[in-house]
Image (tube, grey):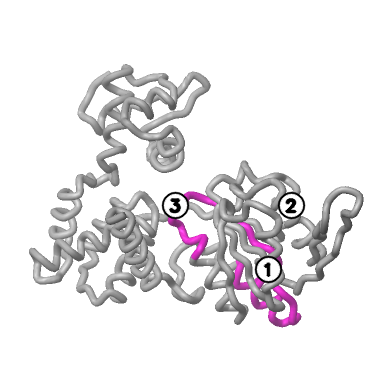
């Protein structure tokens, strides 16, 4: 029970921290310029016509701003945003309860929409297209369908695995956007903005040092900023310089290239235990003590993007860069 309470307290603290740093309008959102421009145009056009915004789908790795953009859309349209997630919607009644509580123009944000139950997804088709859902009442010979009219709303879906979304659902989104990893310069801008909101003094070199090790992800950059802030508060008079950021991140075992302890462990496993591969995902996961899904979704994308790892039909293969980074030779 004590561990559960501690976990809940930490989750609330992390959520509060994220909300403090989350941009609330397009002008504050850094990066993803093309997506931002498309959304601003769509919002302006919808408001001029007095219509609801078209349904929007965001895809891409976690931590890049999908949830943030959903709330910004709500702020820009001047409507409420109701939030849920795919795994929570297990039966049609869950969806019906959510949709019938909406007001005209509201945004429904479904995170991890690809994990929604198939039966719920099928009910969503008519809700998105016709703004109505058909509910079955009773069973057997007495069963009958009742059609519930819904106010016009905007569905905003977010997914880390767009390939798992059924084609009929994907086709009903008018705006489909894929968010990409950030360059260090943009991440440094985000770090500086976040530091200002937290009241922490930070030098450009310190912000860039954090950004270079943030794996191209704003959420990770803000989390690292929090850890560096603690270090600076205790050991550097609450001022983050390049040297302070470097020392604190080394304490966290995050190297200058953004590789953390698990990244190095994965690469060492492939390079040293299996001669660089090819080696299967399940074998790697067992060797490093992680779940295969975690390795595939949380670690591999960055390692592949940075050129340390290749996926082949026979398995994962470490590149020459991986051997070089580890100080090994093939």
Residue 274 rendering spot, x and y as whole percentages: 33, 18
Q: In the rendered image, which residue does mark 1 sit on?
A: 154
Q: Residues within 10 Å of mark 2 (few under 14, many from 20)?
A: few
Q: Residues within 10 Å of mark 1 (few under 14, many from 20)?
A: many
Q: Are marks 1 and 2 in contact (CB under 8 Å)?
A: no
Residue that appears at 39% across and 40% down: 299
Left or right for 61, reference 211: right
Say which label, 1 or 2, has the lower sequence index. 1
Instruction: Choose between 120 and 250: the one closer to the eye.
Output: 120
Residue 181 circle label: 3
Say which label, 1 or 3, has the lower sequence index. 1
Residue 325 rendering spot, x and y as whole percentages: 25, 33
Helix, strand or loop under label 3:
loop
Residue 13 circle label: none
Badge nearest the viewer, 1 or 2? 1
Quarter assignment of residue 203:
bottom left
Q: Which residues are magenta?
A: 38-67
Q: In the rendered image, which residue does mark 2 sit on?
A: 171
Residue that appears at 24% across and 66% down: 204
């Amino acid at each position: 029970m004590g561990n559960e309470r501690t976990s809940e307290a930490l989750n609330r603290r992390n959520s509060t921290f994220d909300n403090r740093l989350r941009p609330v309008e397009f002008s504050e959102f850094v990066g993803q310029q093309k997506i931002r421009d498309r959304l601003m145009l769509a919002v302006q056009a919808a408001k001029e016509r007095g219509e609801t915004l078209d349904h929007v789908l965001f895809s891409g790795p976690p931590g890049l701003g999908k949830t943030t953009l959903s709330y910004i859309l709500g702020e820009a349209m001047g409507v409420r945003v109701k939030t849920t997630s795919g795994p929570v919607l297990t039966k049609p009644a869950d969806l019906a309860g959510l949709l019938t509580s909406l007001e005209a123009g509201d945004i429904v944000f479904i995170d991890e929409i690809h994990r929604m139950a198939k039966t719920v997804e099928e009910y969503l088709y008519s809700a998105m297209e016709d703004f109505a859902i058909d509910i079955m009442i009773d069973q057997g010979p007495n069963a009958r369908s009742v059609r519930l009219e819904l106010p016009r709303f905007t569905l905003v879906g977010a997914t880390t695995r767009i390939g798992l979304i059924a084609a009929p659902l994907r086709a009903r989104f008018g705006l489909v956007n894929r968010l990409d990893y950030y360059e260090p310069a943009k991440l440094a801008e985000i770090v500086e903005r976040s530091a200002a909101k937290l009241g922490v003094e930070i030098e450009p070199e310190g912000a860039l040092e954090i950004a270079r090790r943030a794996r191209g992800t704003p959420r990770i950059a803000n989390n690292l900023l929090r850890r560096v802030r603690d270090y600076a508060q205790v050991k550097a008079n609450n001022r983050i310089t390049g040297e302070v950021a470097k020392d604190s991140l080394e304490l966290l075992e995050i190297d200058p290239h953004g590789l953390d302890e698990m990244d190095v462990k994965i690469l060492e496993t492939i390079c040293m235990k299996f001669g660089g591969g090819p080696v299967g995902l399940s074998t790697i996961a067992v060797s490093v003590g992680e779940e295969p899904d975690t390795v595939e979704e949380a670690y591999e994308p960055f390692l592949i993007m940075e050129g340390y790892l290749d996926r082949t039909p026979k398995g994962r293969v470490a590149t020459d860069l991986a051997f070089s980074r580890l100080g090994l030779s093939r």
